[in-house]
Amino acid sequence: MSVDERYDGIIVKYNQIGEKIADPGALDSKEFAKLSKEYSDMGQVVEKIEELKVCVKERQELEEMLSGDDEEMREMAELESAELDKKIPEIELEVKVLLLPKDEADEKNAILEVRAGTGGDEAALFAMQLFRMYQRYSDLHGWKFEIMSISETGIGGYKEASANITGRGVFARLKYESGVHRVQRVPETESGGRIHTSAATVAVLPEAEEVDVLIEEKDLRVDVFRASGAGGQHVNTTESAVRITHIPTGVVVSQQDEKSQHKNRQKAMKVLRSRIYDAERAKVDAVRAANRKSQVGSGDRSERIRTYNYPQGRVSDHRINLTLYKIAEITESGELDEIIDALTAEDQAERLAEA
C-alpha cells in the first residue's frame, strides 16, 4: 500500500465513523463513546492530510505553469513552488507524528510521588520544592492537584509526598519527569558557604482504572493501625490508617491522611493499582528502550535526569543535553513547558526513527 492509499484509507474510515455516530440510536452507549473518541482523535490527522493534499495539488499545478512561455507567470510559480517545497515536508512530518502509535496511558490522570533522596534535611527541602513546582505547573494547565499524603520533616521539608493530578493529557505531559532530580546549592544552614549536592526521586504513575488492572481480594493483605504524625504523636486514636500489600508483586502502599479508614483504603487501592499498572508498562518499555540509543520516555527512576544548579542559575536535563538559565521561573513558577516540549519532540523523533 502506498502512502497516498494509506492516507485515503484514513479519510474513508474517518467518514465512515462520522456516519455511524450521526445515527447514535443504532449504537449502544459504550460503542457510541468509543467511536466518538476515535472520531475526535482522527480529526486532527485528517485535517493535516487534507491540507497536504491541497498543497501537493497546488505544487502539480505550478509545475505546469513553470513549463509555460509566460516569463512573469514562471517567476511567480517559482516563488510559490519554493514555499511549497518547504511546507510540504513539514506537513508530511506532522502527519507522521500524528500517526505514531499512541501511548494508551497518555490521556490518563497521574499520581505524583516525590521522595527525598541523599542529602538529609537539604534533600527533604528540595523534595518539598519539587512537589510545589509540579503543583504550580498543574495550576498553569488548569489541572486539579489533590494532595494525597505528605510526610514532613521538622524543618518544613518533605520526606515523601504524593498527589493525584487530574485533567486533560496529564500523564502525556508529566511522564518524562520520573527519575532522580539533583540540586546543587548552598544550604541555609551551611555557615562555610559550601555547595552541597542533594537529590530527590520523582515517580509519575498513570492512574489505573479497575479495568486496567485485575486485583483479586485474595491477593491482598490489609493491615490497619493508628495514624501518627511528626515525632510519633497520634493524629487520632482510632485505627484509621491502612497498609495494603499485594502479595504476588510485593507492592506495599500505606495511607493515613484521612480520618476515615474507608477513605484511606480507597486512596491506597488507587495508588496500588497505578503502581502495578506502571510496573507492567515498564516491562514493555524496557524491551522497547533496549533498541534505542537513549531512554527519554522510559521513566527509569534510578536514572539521574536533571540537575538544578543554583549558583549558576541553570537547570540541565541530561537526557537531551538541554540547559536553561531560568531556574527561578522553573522551580518557583512551574514553567516546565520548554523542557517538556523538548523531551516530547525527542521522544517523537526516536519513535519516528524506529518506524
Image: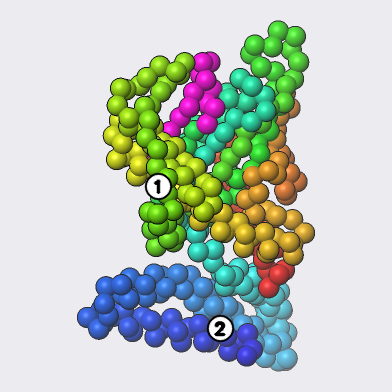
Up-down relation of residue 250 to residue 224 (above or below): below
Relative to 317, does residue 154 appear above or below in the rendering?
Answer: above
Expressed as whole percent of the image width and height from the top left, the position of residue 166 reads 40, 48
Rendered residue at 32%/76% (across/down): 31
Q: Position of residue 183 (x, y in %)?
A: 68, 29
Q: Residue at x 48, y 27 (%)?
A: 151
**Residue flagged by tag 1: what amino acid is it?**
Met
Occupied quadrant, residue 223: top left
- The span picked out in magenta is 143-160
In-image side of 81 versus 277 (left or right)? right
Depicted 12 relative to depicted 231: above or below: below
For label 1, the residue is 269
- The prevailing secondary structure element of the residues shown in magenta is strand
Q: Decide: few, some or many residues near mark 1? Use Cα within 10 Å; few <14, some 14-19, many ≥20.
A: many
Q: Position of residue 108 (x, y in %)?
A: 45, 56
Q: Residue at x 43, y 81 (%)?
A: 14
Q: Is residue 270 left or right of residue 205?
A: left
Q: Given the current orientation, which residue lies at the most extreme top position?
A: 191
Of residues 163 and 17, the one drawn nearer to the viewer in this rendering: 163
Indicate which disc residue 66 carries.
Answer: none
Quadrant of the snapshot with the C terminus: bottom right
Residue picked out by circle 2 = 7
Q: Name the residue located 38 percent from the left edge and 27 percent from the top edge.
A: 227
- The 10 Å Cα crowd at callout 2, few under 14, some 14 to 19, many 20 or more, is some
- Residue 313 included in the magenta stretch of the image: no
Instruction: Looking at the image, tell me whether mark 1 or mark 2 is earlier in sequence order.
Output: 2
SS at mark 1?
A: helix
Q: Secondary structure at mark 2?
A: helix
Q: Nearer the viewer, residue 102 or 329?
A: 102
Q: Which sits in the foreground, 198 or 355?
A: 198
Quadrant in the rendering for residue 70: bottom right
